[in-house]
Image: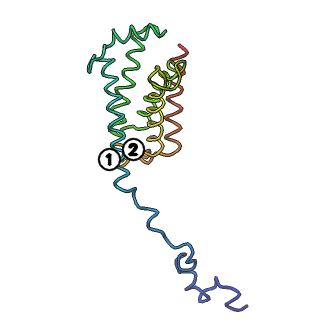
Amino acid sequence: MSDTAAPWRAGAGSDTLMKPLTELRPDIRARPDLHRPPPLGADLGLLALRLTVGLIMAGHGAQKLFGLFGGNGISGTGKAFAALGFHPGDFYAGLAGVSEFAGGLGFALGLLTPLAAAALIGVMINAMVIGAPQGLWAISGGIEYPITIAVVALAVAATGPGRFALDRPFRWRGGGLRSAAFALGAGGIGAAIVLAL
């Protein structure tokens, strides 16, 4: 048997076996651009989005919980919830306030982002159910605002919060379908439980 017929034998083509795959197959050369982090602009954009939406939602929660920023606090918000059919009103006002406040702060900080997104999505699904009879546009009390917040929360769960986030050490920092599915699923289940009670 010749060496050419048995390239695995010692001394027969052993230099070929030791070459890197990229030398043997120039069509699959390493692409360093595949491992580059996202551009700085993308991370700054995510930071601006998270801070804006997260802090506004935290502010809504503070209105309900503490009466800040012109809000009515638990008792006043509870009466509004009771008028919408949520009994006891104070409990549901507190639940919505905590979800918005904690979810908003987590979203702004990029901390436990899938969970923070789930909290915001859950509250927004409830708001959509309440506002759906009024249609889409906010001018008639419709659901354009909760849809927008829910989609932003879901999108950030899917993309990840970016490098300027407290989630950087955790495995969900890069987002992905699992993070998005968790945010949507947990938010949907939470909303369904509230609506069923």
Q: Work out whether 74 lies above or below 103.
A: above
- Amino acid type, mark 2: Pro
- In the image, residue 70 sits, relative to residue 180, either above or below, namely above
**Rendered image: mark on residue 113:** none
- The residue that appears at 50% across and 18% down in the rendered structure is 130
Residue neighbourhood size for the residue with mark 1, other residues' Cα within 10 Å, grouped as few (<14), some (14–19), many (≥20): some
Which residue shows up at 52% across the image and 33% down it? 184
Task: Locate residue 144, reporting x and y percent.
Answer: 47, 28
Lateral position of residue 112 relative to residue 66, left or right: right
Q: Position of residue 18 (x, y in %)?
A: 54, 80
Seen at 43% across and 45% down, the residue is 160
The residue that appears at 50% across and 23% down in the rendered structure is 128
Q: Nearer the viewer, residue 133 or 103?
A: 133
Q: At label 1, which amino acid type do we have? A: Phe
Give the secondary structure at mark 1: loop
Residue 182 image offset from top left, x and y in percent: 51, 36
Considering every residue shown, the one lying at the far front of the view is 139
The residue wearing badge 2 is 161
Element at badge 2? loop
Residue tagged 1 = 164
Give coordinates of residue 76: x percent, y percent: 34, 9
Side (left or right) of 193 relative to 160? right
Quadrant where the image shows the N terminus: bottom right
Q: From the viewer's perspective, is 25 left or right of 127? A: right
Q: Looking at the rendering, which quadrant does residue 36 occupy?
A: bottom left
Q: Quadrant of residue 157?
A: top left
Please report contact status of discs 1 and 2: CB closer than 8 Å, yes or no: yes
- Bin the neighbour count of mark 2 within 10 Å (Cα to Cα): few under 14, some 14-19, many 20 and up: many
